[in-house]
Amino acid sequence: MSDQVNHFIGGVPVAEGATFATYDPVTGLVVREVREADRTVVDRAVAAARSALPAWAALPVAERAAWMRRLADAIEERFEDLVAAEIADTGKSVTQTRTLDIPRGAANFRSFAEIAAQHPENAFHLTDVLSYTVRKPLGVVAVIVPWNLPFLLATWKLGPALVAGNTVVVKPSEHTPGSVAVLAEIAASIGLPPGVLNVVHGFGGGSTGQFLVEHPGVDAVTFTGESRTGSTIMKAVADRVKPVSFELGGKNAGLVFADADLDAAVEGSVRSVFTNGGQVCLCTERLYVERPVFEEFTARLAKRAGELRFGRPADQDTTMMPMISAEHRDKVLSYYELARGEGAEIRAGGGVPRFGDDRDGGYYVEPTVLTGLPHDSRVNREEIFGPVCHVAPFDTETEAVELANDSEYGLAATVWTSNLSRAHRVARSLEAGLVWVNTWYLRDLRTPFGGVKLSGIGREGGTRSLDFYSEPTTITIKLEPGND
Ligand code: NAD
Ligand code: 6OD
């Protein structure tokens, strides 16, 4: 793709609007110039989606599913372009990008093609009454996504929205326009009907994102991002009572019991705390460890944190990536300072790595392990979204569950134990949409995905996604008795 990112409306690139720069998190240097969609451009995108809607919605689901498979195939053909675009915007390691971010894009389209094709309509029969439901698309759906897993999260919503018969206008994060811009090229190259998938670029509040969600021609909003932004969007669409699906922030707990396989718990926690630089909504930021193993676990986690490798994205053994922006790096560092101020013991990290090369202009922070903070400290309450966790001891199972649940968020949790009954009992007691036992971020795309409390509204995943992206109409027929 070129260094200039344009919108994609009605099947063609649109080079309109002021431009803004994006920056390479590895070096802080400019990556590309991006067009910012103003209200006029957003109008055009919504109009294109609206005009494509009747024909797309009228296609048999099997044909829309076939389009989803073609998109998946084409993603695999443009795999390396997508990997390059994602790395340029985020500074992710090539290893992660090749194994998680881009393959999940293809899997998202392929899975929802299968799920939609097998999704039955309901029918209910009483003696002389037959009721059944038919599903219709919502219409034009606005898809607004963040920067941490740009391609994975956009396609996670596009797959089900499109296969359900909606047309979409997607707005990637202002930090990470590249991979969705390649997806637009892919859509054009396979001849996806113009207007079915439209892409507009720009910022959020006071810019493209706000213009899009407020637009009267948008029938529903599906959003992934910060809880505060979710709340703002909810207010913006309240007057029109638009359906919303929100996947929001987390302050996820991990519980490590003394009976756990400690090697697995340490390595699993290294993944759950530091993957993607801790910039995954599912990452663990609060670890509670049963007292007999607290010291050993914490020491081993801190040692492993210190061993993570700040290589270049292209190096196969890179395991630590930069923060997305200077602003986000400063936010994470402000929590490291706050932790010091609140009296934390810094068991690993706590600062900024120095490289002596161009990476000193990038947005790196050290992976950090903290102990010694009170449960109600801000560091333990607020989502930081960086490579950092606080570890605290607990004495009883009840206490562990209470500590984990004492949060405004409720997205994900991990439980490390070798006691099967405890695993079930604790998992059911946790106030979280997702609980992983002896693993982390293991996904089956057919399962409901989402959070409780400040972490979101609704569930996507499997048929739940199709339920959100469509409206059922119940048709009830009074049957004449004895006429059959
Ligand atoms: P963000 O809320 O700042 O931005 C997300 C998207 O919303 C961006 O495209 C942004 O431009 C847009 N936006 C911002 N303000 C808007 C407005 N007023 N109207 C319309 N659009 C607006 O989030 P972020 O910083 O990009 O992402 C990090 C956050 O996302 C973290 O809180 C993380 O936990 C959360 N997240 C949650 C999940 C999940 O599945 N629950 C997944 C990934 C990220
Ligand atoms: O794996 C997924 O489907 C998903 N929605 C992940 C979200 C990750 C948050 O950063």
Image (cartoon, rainbow, N blue to C red):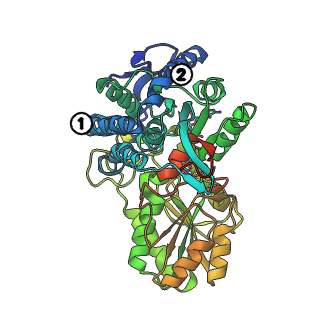
Q: Nearer the viewer, residue 218 or 318?
A: 218
Question: Residue furthest toward the left?
Answer: 77
Residue type, mark 2 in image: Arg
**Which quadrant is the N terminus positioned in?**
top left
The percent position of residue 387, horizontal first and vertical second, equals 49, 56
Residue that mark 1 sits on: 77
194 horizontally vs 408: left or right: left
Query: Left of 463 or right of it: where is 216?
Result: right
Q: Position of residue 269 (x, y in %)?
A: 45, 67
Residue 140 % position (x, y): 55, 29
Residue under the point 39% across and 31% down: 178
Position of residue 105 measured from the top left corner of the image (x, y, whole percent) = 37, 43
Q: Nearer the viewer, mark 2 or mark 1?
A: 2
For the residue pair 163 and 398, the one nearer the viewer reads as: 163
Instruction: Rate crowding at label 1 as few (under 14), some (14 to 19) or many (20 or more) other CA atoms within 10 Å.
Output: few
Residue furthest right as drawn: 239
The answer to whether residue 262 shows anywhere in this view is: yes
**Labelled disc at residue 50:** 2
- Check disc 1 and report its element: helix, strand or loop: helix
- Res 185 quadrant in image: top left
Real-space CA distance between mark 2 and mark 1, rounded to the nearest whole angstrom: 30 Å
Residue appearing at x 40%, y 67% in the figure:
304
